[in-house]
Amino acid sequence: MDYSIWMLNAADVTAYRAVRHEALVNHPDAYASSADSFAARGDEDLAALLGQMAFFGVFAEGSLAGLVAFGQTQGEREQHRGWLYQVYVQPRLRGTGAGLALIETAVAHASSRVIQLHLMVGAHNVPAIRLYEKAGFKTYGTDPRCLLVNGRYIDEHMMVRFFDEAPGKTDNE
């Protein structure tokens, strides 16, 4: 299946809303936000969000089929760090390489702005963990009981990709 990737903007609010809501409904244990809280957000609020962070979308057959967001940490001593958020690809594109291409697009964008990129992923989500590993991310810890979803605790792995040195090397080595 053919697909293309580009940065989302305020004109993409309707498509973003639909795909993000789909992700939250179908995979409630994968995200910190609930579908209900997201559905309550107005279009102006979502348009502002699309302008605050870099959102990339994968498009197939004329419609948005996946997304990822990049945000840079704003603290004075943390500006060297960035985060990937809201990663989702519809089932119709899974296994096509679109997910990896989407993440690599966000990684390329982030690499000119930060020296390390972080993400969190459910410890149970083996396919996502494998995808992030293919994109060069390494697990550096687990946040136990990170989320509480429908009465069930979700542990989340914390993953990082360093841009300024060999993967996995830190000042502690």
Image: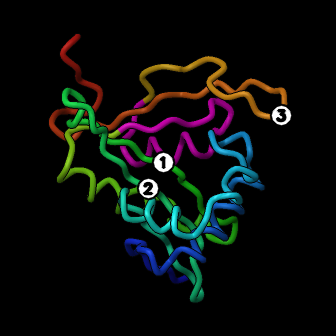
Q: Amino acid at mark 3?
A: Asn
* First-in-chain label (2 vs 3): 2
Whole-angstrom CA distance, mark 3 to mark 1, is: 21 Å
**Residue 4 in the image, given as x and y percentages of width and height:** 44, 79
**Of the residues under marks 3 and 1, which one precedes in the sequence?**
1
Whether residue 81 appears in magenta in the rendering, the answer is no
Which quarter of the rendering shows the N terminus? bottom right
Q: Position of residue 137 (x, y in %)?
A: 39, 38
Residue 142: x %, y % from top left: 53, 20
Range drawn in magenta: 118-138
Residue at label 2? 69
Is the C-beta separation of discs 2 and 1 under 8 Å? Answer: yes
- Label 3, on which residue? 150
The residue that label 1 is drawn on is: 85
Residue located 62% across and 45% down the image: 127
The amino acid type found where label 2 is placed reads Ala
For the image shown, how many numbered marks are present on the structure? 3
